């Protein structure tokens, strides 16, 4: 008999920044996948940059148009995948990821949208002698 465990993994999903609200309210819906299989594609932390480049190339949009969603999913629902030139770090989640499994939504790279910050965190824009697109975070 196979032993059933409740192990979870923290993985990341890349989506367009306009999708952050539906992701937080509905979760990650497999039917919205643009691939042949209707699954949710997830990557490890070391493959986030690759995933953003891959999605931006596929959609023809700049890389700063995407956010990274952190999810905590059960290992039993995941299948490891390979991609040409990518042997590790790509996972496929069968079915939908419910919103309670979505832990954090973060923009890429190095800027965080104010709506995604947890309570008690303030952000300030220093406009004197700095680029106005750079956001400094105070934790």
Image (spheres, helix red, strand yellow):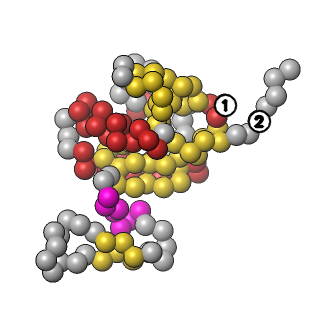
First reached walking from the N terminus: tag 1 or tag 2? 2
Q: Is label 2 in a helix, a strand or a loop? A: loop
For the point 17% across and 78% down, which residue is it?
127
Instruction: Give above or below for 48 relative to 83.
Output: below
Please state the extent of the stretch shown in magenta in the rendering.
Answer: 110-116
Q: Mark 1 Cα within 10 Å, few/some/many (few <14, many 20+)?
A: some
Residue 106 seen in the figure: yes
Q: Is label 1 in a helix, a strand or a loop? A: helix
Horizontal side of residue 33 vs 128, given as left or right: right
Q: Residue furthest right?
A: 1
Q: Are marks 1 and 2 in contact (CB under 8 Å)?
A: yes
Instruction: Give above or below for 104 relative to 90.
Output: below
Q: Residue furthest left?
A: 129
Q: Dot 1 corresponds to which residue? A: 76
Q: Which numbered dot is residue 5?
A: 2
Residue 124 occupies quadrant: bottom left
Q: Quadrant of the N terminus?
A: top right
Let me know if residue 114 is in the magenta part: yes
Q: Mark 2 Cα within 10 Å, few/some/many (few <14, many 20+)?
A: few
What is the count of numbered marks? 2
Residue 129 picture location, percent across and down: 13, 77
């Amino acid at each position: 008999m196979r032993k059933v465990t409740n192990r979870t993994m923290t993985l990341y999903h890349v989506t367009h920044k306009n999708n952050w609200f539906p992701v937080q309210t509905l979760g990650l819906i497999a039917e919205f996948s643009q691939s042949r299989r209707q699954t949710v594609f997830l990557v490890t932390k070391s493959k986030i940059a690759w995933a953003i480049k891959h999605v931006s190339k596929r959609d023809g949009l700049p890389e700063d148009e995407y956010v990274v969603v952190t999810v905590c999913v059960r290992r039993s629902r995941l299948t490891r995948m390979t991609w040409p030139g990518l042997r590790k770090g790509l996972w496929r989640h069968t079915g939908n990821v419910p919103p309670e499994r979505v832990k954090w939504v973060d923009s890429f790279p190095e800027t965080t949208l104010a709506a995604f910050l947890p309570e008690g965190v303030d952000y300030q824009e220093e406009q004197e002698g700095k680029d106005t697109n750079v956001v400094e975070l105070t934790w």
